Image (tube, helix red, strand yellow):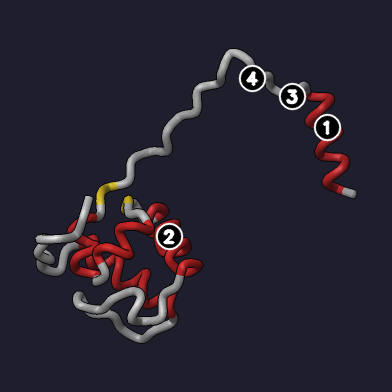
Amino acid sequence: MGAEGLVPEEDTAEAQMLRRLFAEILGVGSVGPDDSFIALGGDSVTMLRLVTRAREAGLEIGIEDVFESGTVGRLAAVARAAGPPAAVEPSADMTLPSQEELDDIAAEMRG
């Protein structure tokens, strides 16, 4: 979904959440609807943090959305409500480890 032609909405819940996340992740005092994540100092690492934290907060955005949308208001317009994580269906050749194997792994991790 591209950001071209999107008109930022008024101060939505999504925009408020994104402003808080921008400020927290980038360590800035305040963020307005026209502020750009990149212009405020965001880079690829902080974008990953933004996408992850947004997901945890219930918003579905991708790194491409941050690049394309630019500002809080435009990003809020493309944000989607995050659903539950997709279930992973085991394949026919997938085998689960036995309890003994799990115990061995746990023992190795403890040192």
Q: Earlier in the sequence, mark 3 or mark 1?
A: 3
Label 4's element? Answer: loop
Q: Amino acid at mark 2?
A: Arg
Residue 53's disc number: 2
Residue 94 drawn above or below residue 53? above
Q: Earlier in the sequence, mark 3 or mark 2?
A: 2
Residues under numbered marks 3 and 2 in contact, where contact means CB atoms less than 8 Å apart: no
Q: Amino acid at mark 3?
A: Pro
Give the farthest residue toward the right: 111
Q: Amino acid at mark 4?
A: Met
Q: Which residue is mark 3?
A: 97
Q: Residue at x 33, y 81 (%)?
A: 39
Please tell me how crowded label 4 is: few (under 14), some (14-19), or many (20+) other residues with Cα within 10 Å: few
Q: Which residue is mark 4?
A: 94
Residues under numbered marks 3 and 1 in contact, where contact means CB atoms less than 8 Å apart: no
On screen, residue 13 versus residue 97, left or right, reads left
Label 3's element? Answer: loop
Report the Cα–Cα distance between label 3 and label 2: 32 Å
Report the Cα–Cα distance between label 3 and label 1: 10 Å
Q: Which residue is mark 1?
A: 103
Q: Residue at x 41, y 81 (%)?
A: 41
